[in-house]
Image (cartoon, helix red, strand yellow):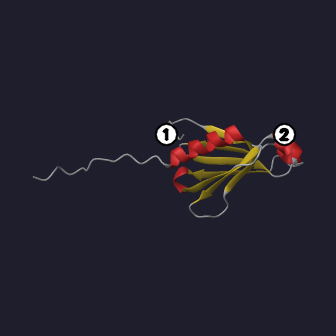
Amino acid sequence: MSSVPIAGERVEARSSRFWALLTMKITRFIFPAHMSADPLGISTTNIKAWYVPWVRQDEHLPMSHIAEVSHDRGFFWDSISVESSGGLNPLVIDGVPKGSARRFVDFVRGAMNVAPQATQPLSPPRR
């Protein structure tokens, strides 16, 4: 059930530490991947290596450039992929708990489906 996002509302998804432990991803166990969405766009924060935590990758995708939101459902954890209209370098986060992934995808799809407000023409009506 998609709801229309309210200005200032924000939703976050984070990879599970338990998933990282079971899949032996030490960096994700220490520094979980984060993905957040608001009515303006989607942002991700990923630290690539646990031994250099000051080197991280922050990405932002404006809501107007989102082409598709993919929600891959697993048995215990889900994956979220957000593709841009350009098609290069999708934003991906793995090992997200099911409830968090569902809320995130519903929020983004609701924000994508919001139609712009129709404006009244500036010229006076014809007689």
The residue identified by callout 2 is: 18
Q: What is the three-letter code of the residue carrying label 1?
A: Val
Residue 1 versus residue 61: which sits nearer the camera? Answer: 1
Quadrant in the picture for the N terminus: top right
Q: What is the three-letter code of the residue carrying label 2?
A: Phe
* Vertical position of residue 120 compared to residue 67: above or below: above
Which residue reaches farthest front? 75
Q: For the point 41% across and 48% down, which residue is it?
A: 116
* Vertical position of residue 68 compared to residue 31: above or below: below
**Which label belongs to residue 4?**
1
Residue 16 versus residue 123: which sits nearer the camera? Answer: 16
How many neighbours does mark 2 have within 10 angstroms: few (below 14), some (14-19), or many (20 or more)?
few
Q: Is residue 127 left or right of residue 104?
A: left
Is label 1 in a helix, a strand or a loop? loop
Residue 31's quadrant in the figure? top right
Q: Is residue 24 left or right of residue 65?
A: right
**Which label belongs to residue 126?**
none
Q: For the point 27% across and 47% down, which residue is it?
A: 120
How many neighbours does mark 1 have within 10 angstroms: few (below 14), some (14-19), or many (20 or more)?
some
Is label 2 in a helix, a strand or a loop? helix
Where does the image place residue 124, in percent across and percent down from the top left?
Answer: 17, 49
Which residue reaches farthest bottom? 87
Q: For the point 59% across and 37% down, which residue is it?
A: 10
Q: Is residue 6 left or right of residue 127?
A: right
Q: Earlier in the sequence, mark 1 or mark 2?
A: 1
